[in-house]
Amino acid sequence: MSAKLFALLCSSLVDTLYMVGVSSAIAFIFGLPLGVVLLVTERGQIMERPALNRFLGSIVNAARSTPFIILMVLLIPVTRMIVGTSIGTNAAIVPLALAATPFVGRVVEGALREVDGGVVEAALAMGASPWQVIAKVLLPEALPAIVVGLTLSVINLIGYSAMAGAIGGGGLGDLAIRYGYQRFRLDVMFMTVAVLIALVNLCQGVGDFLAKSLRRDGRN
Amino acid sequence: MAISLQGITKIFGQGPTALKALDGIDLEVPEGTIFGIIGSSGAGKSTLVRCVNLLERPTSGKVLVGGVDFTALSEAELRIARKKVGMIFQSFNLLSRRTVFGNVALPLELARWPRERIAPRVEELLDLVGLAERRDAYPSQLSGGQKQRVGIARALANDPEVLLSDEATSALDPGTTQSILELLRDINERLGLTILLITHEMNVIKEICHNVAVIDKGRIVEEGAVLDIFTDPREEATKSLLSEIVGVNLPERFGGLDFSREPIEEGDLVVQLRFFGDVAAEPVMSDLIRRFDVDVNILTARIDHIRNVPYGTLVVGLSGEEWQRRDALEHLRSLDLTVEVVGRVGKALRTAV
Ligand SMILES: Nc1ncnc2c1ncn2[C@@H]1O[C@H](COP(=O)(O)OP(=O)(O)OP(=O)(O)O)[C@@H](O)[C@H]1O
Ligand SMILES: [Mg+2]
């Protein structure tokens, strides 16, 4: 492989890491509270607001059922408004973050749902407020499961970011399309795929390790 | 603090599927007592105890704890009031990611104690329940009995005046149950805590309760001092719960004997005697044989203690002449015993036993 190609691969990897990193961060920041709200406002939960819950739930479902590629196209005007352009890594971050946020929300909701109701009840019996239950019981107890879910979200984002490359988002996907596909450079294609595989495995490994070291329930 | 439940009704659901889990419960738990509520599965025990701290809000009725009407408090006031009512659970409900220390510290953190005051308080509580050396263990590393000790320490952290226990020993083996019950009794005596405990095991009631109420299908069917209820149960629900420990479920046939609830001419009399207190020590049987010249065959017997008072049940067959048996029975009835003629057996009795 030529030095030029290697440099190209490196800068594409950096672009991918940047896109995935920033969009993951944004998705966590909004998805975490979203997941908490989705759970606690459910009927029978500590802050039940059935109407709000249904409303949020339907938005999340709508966002999740729209294919990413379509979401990306639909969001072009929004992206232009926020970033100023619809091309490049920064522009890709908008649809990536937007697609990942409801996913993270559902993942967090699911993790919180797995927390034993008896533990919540015990905290309420001690006089905990709903906020205290969230901060002291639900989130800490669900942390390992949340980490597992966030790992999944990051891995999804790596895949999506490659897709974003297809419409000029930059990063490894962009490289694979421009060199590998359009210029028939199969070696570049395989290199990018190999790097993506390595990246996904690395994420999964780190996530699994983190989740495992956080568990204290005798499963580690 | 005393607990007073007044006309508590709890209906789950509505319409045709509505279920009346509690049906007009009136209950007075005097301050400083260990009060047991016993009932079979689905009787409404958990619902009842959860109504005390309003984890379950009753459909109607009042809950007074220490004279304060919990049902009239706002959410914020209720949270403060709940700190004076500790609770322990069958499944312990400990936080898996906190150590023993962290679990006991939780209620203090919730009550916003300053960090430097939490540590000594937790140490003190762990000493009380005998778990000081396991302070850094996680719940998954503890035995059931140790987990319940953590649960108890946690429940006591805010210096409650009432402790609610929902089947706290039901997941434990008999030996561990015993030690947890002793701890509860110790806490009751040392801290003057009022304990309301629910269970489906008469053994638990027998071991530590002063008073007991029997709940059946959402109603309190019988209530009183433990000794009275044990020795003179009135209701079927009580009797069936008692039979588990008093063990007087008479088999329909005594090991191949021809037993009959109807009088049989010439048959031996089968009599069930329930005794309690000092009578137990008296040689009732030998007295019977000596004075009335009857033969006494002990068919089944079970003797136990309720907080140091002996009680028991004896099923005996009396044989002899008709008048001798009648006099013997008369004599038994004059003693401080509960006497019940359960049936007769044919002559085979003497050889079979
Ligand atoms: N949240 C609920 N929704 C609907 N029905 C309920 C609910 N909680 C309890 N019940 C019903 O109320 C009745 C009493 O239940 P409860 O849990 O109080 O019984 P219990 O005496 O504690 O039984 P067990 O010994 O099995 O724990 C049962 O028929 C149960 O199915
Ligand atoms: Mg129960």
Image: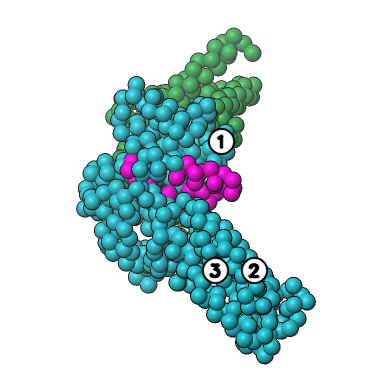
Chain colours: A green, B cyan
Give residue B142's mark. 1
Q: Is residue B50 left or right of residue A205?
A: left
User: Which residue bears the numbered disc 3?
Assistant: B274
Q: Amino acid at mark 1?
A: Leu
Q: State how many labels appear.
A: 3
Q: Is residue B42 visible?
A: no
Q: In the rendering, at what x and y percent does residue B300 appear?
A: 65, 68
Q: Chain letter of disc 1?
A: B
**Which quadrant of the view contains residue A87?**
top left
Q: Chain letter of disc 3?
A: B
**Is B177 a magenta residue?**
yes
Q: Is residue B332 left or right of residue A68?
A: right
- Does residue B216 lie above or below A66 as drawn? below
Point out the stretch of residues depicted in magenta.
B160-185
Label 1 vs 3, first from the N-terminus: 1
Between A39 and B172, the one nearer to me in the picture: B172
**Residue visible at 45% across and 60% down in the picture:** B227
Q: Chain letter of disc 2?
A: B
Which residue is most to the right?
Answer: B351
**Is A152 a magenta residue?**
no
